[in-house]
Amino acid sequence: MEKRDRLYEGKAKAVFATDDPNLLIQYFKDDATAFNGVKRGTITEKGVVNNMVASRLMTIIEAVGIPVHFIKRLNAREQLIRKVAIIPVEVVVRNVVAGSMAKRLGRQEGEPLPRPVIEFYYKTDALDDPLITRDHAMVFGWATEAELDWIMAACLRINDVLVGFFANIGVRLVDYKLEFGRLAENPQQVVLADEISPDTCRLWDMVTGEKLDKDRFRRDMGGVVEAYQEVARRMGLALES
Ligand code: TMP
Ligand code: ASP
């Protein structure tokens, strides 16, 4: 596998071509942004931790039969992935009220939800990723009805798996963001893409409620690196650099 040109650089990751047109390399950076890039910083070794955490979570999800873009972790900061066209609809799955849901609906952070709630956001930085309905996604051609049905079912299955996995290591999976894509080699096939990591989840210690995720960076709480490392440690992942 030969690494070629950088195709894309995002806020927390970069993507490189390979000698196979259907395969890419996803590189995890230490850069962190919040509030659509308004707040910027770096979190030491975040890329290494997120690569390990995201690789393990993708493997767990694939093992229950949900297709993923992840193929394998290559080294400390890189993964080999299938090339996809990202569907511009970010999916947030919530088990507990927090963040924008608490603000928008005037609820207390920490209120458990009686069942998982799925929200869709239009992935477009110029508009700050607005909350949308399924109808918006369909009428503007961002995703088909069949794709949205498939995505919702996949999210509920993923949620069951991840809630259980994190509960086992003493972590409450409060909410998280997922992205899906259409395989370059077969656009009919939708797969889970991007990453699942402390950057894209809210993870609270089950007993103390301590935040083990990017809210420590967003809210200037300190202990960001230590929180990310604690998640990896509880997952049984040895830290390498
Ligand atoms: P929110 O409460 O700010 O809407 O965030 C919900 C979840 O989605 C939370 O776990 C953080 C994650 N998220 C991202 O991964 N990327 C984003 O751009 C945003 C806004 C949220
Ligand atoms: N990832 C988004 C940003 O770059 C927002 C966030 O995670 O809070 O600003």
Image: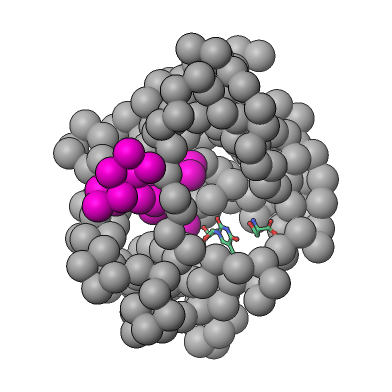
Question: What residue lies at 55% left-to-right and 66% top-to-bottom?
Answer: 123
Q: Main secondary structure of the magenta part?
A: strand
Q: Is residue 100 magenta?
A: no
Q: Tell me where residue 146 sits by quadrant.
A: bottom left
Report the front residue among 67 and 52. Answer: 67
Report the front residue among 71 and 185. Answer: 185
Is 36 positioned to the left or the right of 2 in the image?
right
Q: Is residue 186 magenta?
A: yes
State which region is magenta.
173-195
Q: Residue furthest left?
A: 65
Where residue 148 sits in the image (x, y, percent)? 28, 68
Where residue 53 sits in the image (x, y, percent)? 48, 31
- On screen, 65 above or below 216? above
Q: Tell me where residue 17 sits by quadrant.
A: top right
Report the front residue among 86 and 177. Answer: 86
Question: What residue lies at 17% left-to-right and 39% top-to-bottom?
Answer: 65
Rendered-image quadrant of the C terminus: top right
Is 91 positioned to the left or the right of 189 in the image?
right
How many numbered dots are placed on residues in this image? 0
Question: What residue lies at 50% left-to-right and 51% top-to-bottom?
Answer: 201
